Amino acid sequence: MSVRGRIRRGIPLRRMPRAAWSAQEPTWREARPGLIEAALKRTQARPSGNWYVVASSREVRRDRPFGRTVAGVELVLWRGSDGALHAGPGACPHLGAPLCLAAVDAGRLVCRWHGLALGSGGFPGWDPFPAYDDGVLAWVRLDEVGGEEPLAEPVLPRRPALGRSIAAVATMTGRCEPEDVVANRLDPWHGAWFHPYSFAHLRVLDAPADPRPGSGEGEDRFVVEVSFRVAGRLGVPVRVEFSCPEPRTVVMHIVDGEGATSVVETHATPLGLDALERPVTAVVEATIAYSDRPGFALARRGASALRPLMRAAARRLWKDDLAYAERRYALRTSGRFPG
């Protein structure tokens, strides 16, 4: 019987057997470095169309601009009078004032230094960038940085209908490169060992078997059966799939069990270098939760109270996973990475 079938008749919580952390079945034999690295190389060869996740859609408001540096490029994002997302260079073309501190008036940026008004049409020496709002995340296209053939829109995974879901976005930063973040997610075997507070009884049911380079997303599908811990020995069993639609994104779909069709999108965005010339990467993780249970409609009405809890859960997990990614970066750049 499917996971969904086992929990369909009652509440999704299941009491898990009591077991010591050290008594788990070791997973190091299955987590082969060559398999993970081959999957990573395939993800890096996929097109992104030069699109980068900048922030959550909610962070870019109508009443003020939003600033962030992506791949060393200072950016400002704002919304026009119709609510459409716009993006441009973060420095005023007059004397370089920070446009993230500008005012937004009638859909234009108004520089606070001398009142220069800038809109989506641009200004001599100041050309806006293509921007895209997918309803959860705000994207910007940086063609000079990406160097790929541009795409009209970002490469997006399938999602449940946003109008019937709860979406929350958490952003964390680490001293590593985007590939180190992606590599962490292409190693599902570490889940119950490294995150026992969140996962239990994790089994990888399917993983790429052929380490030869390829190009299809399906080659890098990881199918995992796991129980998400709720409290103590109570957990929710699900079956999930991990895949990479583009080089800086790893997506986890719940395909069986409570919350089927829900998705967690992990986006790795390069920011630039810190004071010690180390790369800094933002992890922008979007959780889009859905359930067909009647009570979920009530939960959606309380979404504003649930979103902080969803963000806190993501940050707790990534506190550890960024340590993994940073360690991987340190090892591979020093020539000490295994394999």
Image (tube, rainbow, N blue to C red):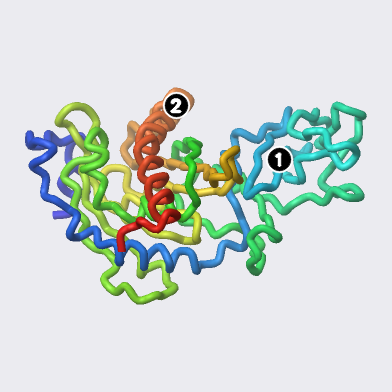
Residue 161 against residue 151 in the figure, above or below: above
Q: Amino acid at mark 2?
A: Pro
Q: What element does badge 2 sit on?
A: helix
Where is residue 188 drawn, in percent x and y? 28, 52
Crowd tier of the residue under label 2, counting other residues whose Cα lies within 10 Å: few below 14, some 14–19, many 20 or above: some
Image quadrant where one finds the C terminus: bottom left
Tell me the residue at 42%/54% (across/down): 334
Question: How far apart are labels 1 and 2 at the CA level?
Answer: 24 Å
Residue extending furthest toward the top: 305
Foreground pick, 295 / 290: 290
Question: In terms of secondary structure, where does tag 1 sit?
Answer: strand
Residue 48 rendering spot, x and y as whole percentages: 57, 62
Q: Residues within 10 Å of mark 1 (few under 14, many from 20)?
A: many
Give the image location of residue 278, x and y in percent. 54, 45
Between discs 1 and 2, the one toward the N terminus: 1
The vertical placement of 215 against 76, above or below, is: below
Q: Is residue 23 visible?
A: yes
Q: Quadrant of residue 108?
A: top right
- State the quadrant of the N terminus: bottom left
Q: Return the residue nearer the eye: 104 or 193.
A: 193
What amino acid is labelled 1 in the image? Leu
The residue identified by callout 1 is: 77
Number of numbered discs: 2
Residue indicated by mark 2: 308
Left or right: where does residue 94 sit relative to residue 145? Answer: right
Q: Position of residue 284 (x, y in %)?
A: 50, 42
In the drawing, does residue 159 fall left or right of residue 241?
A: right
Q: Nearer the viewer, mark 1 or mark 2?
A: 1
